[in-house]
Image (cartoon, rainbow, N blue to C red):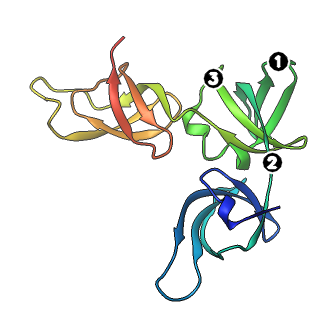
Amino acid sequence: MGSTSDIKNNLVMEFNGNLWKVVEFLHVKPGKGNAFVRTKLKKIPGGQIIEQTFRSGEKIDDVKLQATEMTYLYSDESHYHIMDNETYEQIALDDELMGPVKDFIKENDIIKVLFRETTPVDVEVAPHVILEITETDPGVRGDTASGGSKPAILETGLKVTVPLFLNIGDMVKVDTRTGEYLERIRG
């Protein structure tokens, strides 16, 4: 059990019977009245985002989660199969849990799975991933880095907007928090 002074980014708390991760927070001390904490919370699993305000000093039920590095093996129609890197134990995660990160992972990628006791509750990936462009319109001679942009589909099925000079087979860095193209990676 903690209080609002313990609120920080990535803190996981139980609120209204569900687990929520703090995405943003702001401690506010108005000129009149009591201080409060304004938060943006993300439901785990699920990804629903809500805004919630807590009075200063209010008790919160923070939850300790265990993070385990695991390897993503493959997916079938309904599950994503992953393996613990230390014990080689394999588990299957459902689409709801993998939903926010499934467009950023490919076979044999390392992911971080957060467990509450023995139950997986969230999956995290690196802030940036490098993926190959598999579909896009061909680049035209004379297109420059400062030119326009075009849609592209990456090897995981993720759709991003890339500069005109990129072609099929190019490797690009993508921000996993926003899903946006960052830069081309030269091999």
Rendering quarter of residue 151: top left
Q: Nearer the viewer, residue 185 or 22?
A: 22
Find disc 3 in the rendering and name its residue.
109
Find disc 2 in the rendering and name its residue.
64
- Give the x, y percent position of residue 103: 55, 38
Per the image, label 1 sits on a secondary structure element best described as: loop
> Residue lying farthest front?
31
Rendering quarter of residue 145: top left
- Give the x, y percent position of residue 56: 65, 75
Find disc 1 in the rendering and name its residue.
86
From the viewer's perspective, is residue 8 above or below residue 160?
below
Q: Amino acid at mark 3?
A: Asp
- Give the x, y percent position of residue 85: 78, 19
Mark nearer the N terminus (1 vs 2): 2
Per the image, label 3 sits on a secondary structure element best described as: loop
Task: Indicate the quadrant containing the C terminus: top left, top right, bottom left or bottom right.
Answer: top left
From the viewer's perspective, is residue 141 above or below residue 117?
above
